[in-house]
Amino acid sequence: MDQNVFESFGGDGQISDLIDQFYYKVLFDQTLRGKFLKADMTRVRLQQKTFFAQMFGCPHTKYTGKDLIEVHKNLNITNQQFDRFLHHLKCILSDMNKPSELIDEILKKVDSHRNLIVFE
């Protein structure tokens, strides 16, 4: 993704809204919430916002958090759970009235990290 995606998405404010809505849904999803019960959700949200901003091509953002493998390797996240993440993400993007082409591009980009998050 390039800077045009970041700009067409709506910038930092829209990314912040996306991530806040995303974790609201995730924490009410019985198949996913257990992965976050012991997590510092303020930190998780901040790291995710930074990661998404970089992934979307924000010119002034650099993700400096832990390596994705390191963060996820002991969480036992399954493909089914990752698919639920994608489902929630797609629903929120749709609710935010993002164009279908942009939604598809974002979902593909997120899914490209599956092998760094799922260990089953």
Image: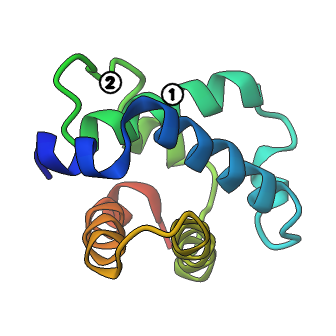
The reply to whether dot 2 and dot 1 touch (C-beta < 8 Å) is: yes
Asked which secondary structure carries label 2, the reply is loop
| Residue 87 spot, x, y in % from top left | 58, 79
Residue type at mark 2?
A: Tyr
Residue receiving disc 2: 63
Name the quadrant containing residue 61: top left
Dot 1: few (<14), some (14–19), or many (≥20) neighbours within 10 Å?
Answer: some
Q: In this picture, is 84 found above or below 35?
A: below
Q: Left of 25 or right of it: where is 73?
A: left
Chain-order first, disc 2 or disc 1: 1
Disc 2 to disc 1, C-alpha distance: 7 Å
Could you say which is closer to the camera, residue 95 or residue 23?
Answer: 95
Q: Residue sitting at 22 percent across and 16 percent down?
A: 60
For numbered disc 1, what is the local secondary structure? helix
Residue at left 76%, top 64%?
Answer: 32
Q: With respect to residue 72, does 57 lie above or below?
A: above
Please provide percent x and percent y for residue 13.
50, 32
Tally of numbered discs? 2
Return the x and y of residue 57 as percentages of the image width and height: 19, 38
Q: Which mark is residue 58?
A: none
Color theme of the render: rainbow
Q: Horizontal placement of 106 versus 90: left or right?
A: left
Which of the pair 91/31 is nearer the observer?
91
Where does label 1 land, which residue? 47
Q: Indicate the quadrant where residue 50 lies.
A: top left
Q: Is residue 111 left or right of residue 36?
A: left
Q: Which residue is nearer to you in this view: 41 or 13? A: 13
Q: Amino acid at mark 1?
A: Gln
Residue 112, horizontal then vertical, whole percent: 26, 66
In the figure, 53 relative to 27: above or below? above
Label 2 packing within 10 angstroms: few (<14), some (14-19), many (20+)? some
